[in-house]
Each structure stands twice: as C-alpha cells, then as structure tokens.
Image (cartoon, helix red, strand yellow):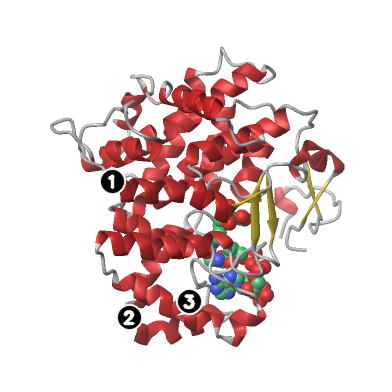
Amino acid sequence: ANGIFTFDPGFTSTASCESKITYIDGEKGQLLHRGYSIEELASKSDYLEVCYLLLNGELPSAEQKAEFVSTVKNHTMVHEQIRNFFNGFRRDAHPMAIMCGVVGALSAFYHDSLDINDSTHRDVTAFRLIAKMPTIAAMCYKYGLGQPLMYPRNDLGYAENFLHMMFGNPCEDSEISPTLARAMDRIFILHADHEQNASTSTVRLAGSSGANPFACIAAGISALWGPAHGGANEAVLKMLEEIGDVSQIETFIAKAKDKNDPFKLMGFGHRVYKNYDPRATVMRESCHEVLAELGVNDPQLELAMKLEEIALNDPYFKEKKLFPNVDFYSGIILKAIGIPTSMFTVIFALSRTVGWIAHWNEMISNPYKIGRPRQLYTGETERSFVPVNERK
Ligand code: SDX
C-alpha cells in the first residue's frame, strides 16, 4: 500500500532477474563472480583481471590479459574538451555531483558513432569507461583542490596510475607505495559487482530503453550516491566521528534500534546478506594489514571494531540479522591511503563501473524489452471535475 511495485512480465523479461555474472547467497554470506569466490579473487587476482572475468565470463590467459591491459591503457585519457566541464563547477562541489555530470557528458562525445547493437562498439564502450573512470575521478579531486588536473601514465599499473593522478603533481615524479597500490586494487575488486543492487538495476532499466551506455552509467552513479547504498562508506566515517569514543557506542546502538529515530548504523545491514558480507571480512583483514604496513594507528579502527563487537552481540541486531557490510571498513582503509571522505563514493563508482557495464552488455546482447515496473494503485477511484467556483 506504500507504492509497492510488482514487476510486469515485460520488466522481468529484460533479464533483469536473470544473469550469469554474479551469484550471492545471503544466508551463507557467499559472493561469486562467474563462479569464483570474492575471497579468492581479492587475494589472488587483480582488478583488471576481474574486469576481464566479469565482461567475458572466463579468467584471461596471459596473452589475453596482456592485450586487455594494453587496450585499457590506450583509453585512459579523456577528450581535452572534457576538462572544460570542470570549470563550470564550484570548487567545493561534491565530487559525486561532478562525476555524474562529466560521465553523462561522455555520451555527447561518443553518441553519433555508437551502435549498441554492434558488439565491437559495446567492447570499445567498456574499455573507454573502465579506462577513463580513474582519470575522471582523480580530476574531480584535483579540481576541488585547485591543483592541475593530472594526465594518466602508461608505464603504471591501473591502481598505481589512479593514485599517481590523485596525489602526483606535474612538478615532480610521484612515488606510489606498492602497499597502497595493492590495497587500492583490492578495494576496486571488492566493489566491482554485486548482482541486482539499486545502481545496477538503474543502469539496466535505463539501458532497456536503448539509451546511450554513458548516460546509463551516469544514472547508475546517481543511484549509487545515496547513503543507503554507495554513499554509506562516507556516512560510516561521519558516524564514527559523531560517536567519538567507545563510551558513546551504546547510545548510538540504542538510537539505531529506536523505531522513532531515523538513525541507522551505517555500514551495517543488507537487503540480501543475512550473514557476514564476505567483502567486509576481506576488507577488515586488509584494514589491519594496510594500517600495520603503514604504521598507522587509527583510533577509528579500534572504535569500529568495538562497535562491531557490541552490535553483533546485541539481541536486536541478532534478531534482524544485521552484520557489517562492504562499507563498514572500506572508509578506514581509504582514509589511511590519504583519500578524503568526499571521494569514497567516487571510488565505489569507479570500481562498480565494470559491473554496471557487464550487466548492461549482458542485457543488450540478448533479446530484451523495455523495463516497465507496475504499481499497486492506492489513489482515488474515478470522479467528476468540479469547477473552481463550486469547490469548498
Ligand atoms: C550497499 O544491494 C547491494 O548489493 C548493495 C551493495 C552493493 O555492493 O551494491 O552491497 C552496497 O549498498 C551496502 C549497504 C550500504 N548501506 C548502509 O550501510 C546503510 C545502513 N544500512 C541500512 O540502511 C540498511 O541495512 C539497508 C538499506 C542496507 C538495507 O535496508 P533494508 O532493506 O530495510 O534491510 P532489512 O530489510 O534487512 O532490514 C531489516 C530490519 C528493518 O527493520 P524492520 O522493518 O524489520 O523493523 O532491520 C532494520 C530495518 O529498519 N535495519 C537497521 C539497519 N539496517 C536494517 N536498523 C538499524 N541499523 C541498520 N543499519
């Protein structure tokens, strides 16, 4: 009765509920990409190899991987006129607002020449987006600082190149720590895809009308921004700052349980996982490794671990099956790498682009119909018009 949606056959036939890309077992806390567990991929693979897997269904041979990496490298620059878009934004604009605008604008550069029914055009679109998202993300950050927008370098790895464009400057060579590059790459992997979440469903629904794929990805970025979805990583850090120290944890747990209080424990709960989000487990382990290797002693990590311990032993959270999700620890690692909270969701969007594109491609390359969710109507029954001078 509150606008509950039921999908008509037309919507489900866009394969929006059928996919071969990612499998989640929410009860077991299992996440597989094309049959490979997220735990194995996070520890043994790298982001571009996972991109190949999500897009093509198989892990690449050494030769296929070399060709894929080389092709991505050759698409990392953006059209010089894209740089002009940034000047239209205030310097203090949220980077996600800039990201939505600039990625949507890519459709103006690749519209006329793009036939989505041609698989080679779809492949180039995938390469362009995977390659350009780090460049655009770093430009969003640099623009806010008033620093020069950095160009990508083809001699660097994917994550290394992103950190170079984020923290480097034209006056000196940037030295990127292998520890940070490896941690960044693992974060990219952990956010790459997650089945039919809100932003991926947005991309599929937009794509089902035949819209330009760059515009569809911009729609996905907009959906991801919300604090209930991809904006949660930024919200977790703000929540930890608000909690302040361990003595306040019980107060905030009580607020999270109070039905009259809109406060939710950020980084906790999930529509699908009713067990640990396996990505949160990997993220927590990575958190300890990165902070130890960097020699960082972040009190917010201690606070987060204590909050997790108390929440997991709380009867309400147990009964509702609320566990930490991917966003609970990611912000602490990103902060240790030197990324500001305003950029956390931008990095989520950068990572998730391959998942969005893989789902878009899977739908477009098979027979599909436009999505058309139906509704449960709860409004007025038909009635006659009343002229304004006869109304009460
Ligand atoms: C992501 O879909 C995806 O796959 C998303 C994602 C991806 O990779 O794409 O995994 C990424 O979005 C992770 C989620 C990040 N969001 C947050 O961490 C924000 C905090 N979490 C909550 O807003 C919430 O858990 C949601 C939005 C994530 C899920 O909300 P639901 O669908 O209402 O969860 P539910 O049905 O399991 O909730 C059961 C109950 C509800 O109460 P009742 O209606 O039964 O009385 O638990 C309550 C919820 O209100 N609840 C919480 C809570 N999360 C759910 N109560 C307090 N704190 C929380 N965090």
Q: Quadrant of the C terminus?
A: bottom right
- Foreground of the two, 261 or 377: 261
Residue 322 sits in which quadrant? bottom right
Q: Tell me which residue sits at (27%, 46%) in the image.
A: 177
- Foreground of the two, 305 or 96: 305
Q: Quadrant of the N terminus?
A: bottom right
Label 3 or label 1, whichever lies nearer to me, is 3
Kindly identify the amino acid type of the residue bearing the numbered disc 1. Asp
Q: CA distance from mark 2 to mark 1?
A: 29 Å
Q: Would residue 164 be found to the left or right of residue 361 on screen?
A: left
Q: CA distance from mark 3 to mark 1?
A: 33 Å
Label 3, on which residue?
Answer: 308
Q: Is residue 146 visible?
A: yes
Q: Tell me which residue sits at (51%, 51%) in the image.
A: 42
Residue 70 sits in which quadrant? top left
Kindly identify the amino acid type of the residue bearing the numbered disc 2. Asp
Where disc 3 sits, the SS reads helix
On residue 92, the disc is: 1
Task: Count residues near mark 2 (Cα–Cα under 10 Å), then give few for <14, some for 14-19, many for 20+.
Answer: some
Label 2, on which residue?
Answer: 245
Label 2 or label 1, whichever lies nearer to me, is 2
Q: From what the image shows, is residue 158 above or below residue 242? A: above
The residue at label 3 has a CB less than 8 Å from ligand 1: no
Q: Earlier in the sequence, mark 3 or mark 2?
A: 2
